[in-house]
Amino acid sequence: MRRPARADILVVGLVALLYGCNRFLWSHHAAGVLGWFLRCYCNDVLAGLVLVAIANILLALGGWRRLPFWAGACLLLFCGVVWECLAPAMKPSAVFDPWDFLAYQCGGGIYFLLYRPKDKT
């Protein structure tokens, strides 16, 4: 078993803090384009960030290597299909939003831009 990277644990904590701030503060008080983004897509971007971090934590605990960029993109695409295509089929209040796919990928992209391990694993 390998130790998860501190950066991944930090990302999970930071995303939880940002989500809470957005959910209870920012999205209720922001107006215009920023308010629209905070209400519609900010949490989806955060989801992309945290999903890759959690996947890397679980992989490290299992003794596996970190996700490469392409695998992170595939993971987020799969999550997008489940959330945006399958969820509306099972839950009447869920809606399909194709822009959410881009938001998830942007979150993952931010993760890979910010976190580049030195050991290239």
Image: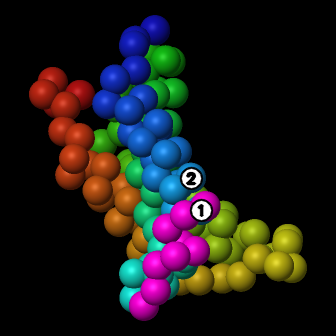
- Magenta segment, principal secondary structure? helix
Q: Are marks 2 and 1 in contact (CB under 8 Å)?
A: yes
The residue shown at (15%, 24%) is: 119
- Start and end of the magenta stretch? 24-32
Residue 21 is situated, as x and y percent measured from the top left of the image, at 51, 56
Magenta includes 49?
no
Task: Indicate left or right for 44 with 65 as reference.
Answer: right
Residue most extreme to the top: 1
Tag 1: amino acid: Arg
- Depth order, front residue of 14/106: 14
Task: Indicate left or right for 44 with 114 as reference.
Answer: right
Magenta includes 27?
yes
Residue at disc 2, secondary structure: helix
- Depth order, front residue of 75/15: 15
The residue shown at (41%, 51%) is: 49
Residue 65 is situated, as x and y percent measured from the top left of the image, at 35, 26
Residue linked to disc 1: 23
- Depth order, front residue of 100/34: 34
The residue shown at (83%, 79%) is: 93
Instruction: Please tell me how crowded label 1 is: few (under 14), some (14-19), or many (20+) other residues with Cα within 10 Å.
Output: some
Tag 2: amino acid: Gly
Per the model, the C-alpha gap separating discs 2 and 1 is 5 Å
- Depth order, front residue of 16/21: 21
The numbered disc on residue 20 is 2
Task: Indicate left or right for 84 with 100 as reference.
Answer: right
Q: Is residue 99 above or below residue 17?
A: below
Q: Is residue 58 above or below residue 96?
A: above
Tell me, yes or no, if residue 100 can be seen here.
no
Residue at disc 1, secondary structure: helix
Q: Is residue 36 above or below residue 18?
A: below
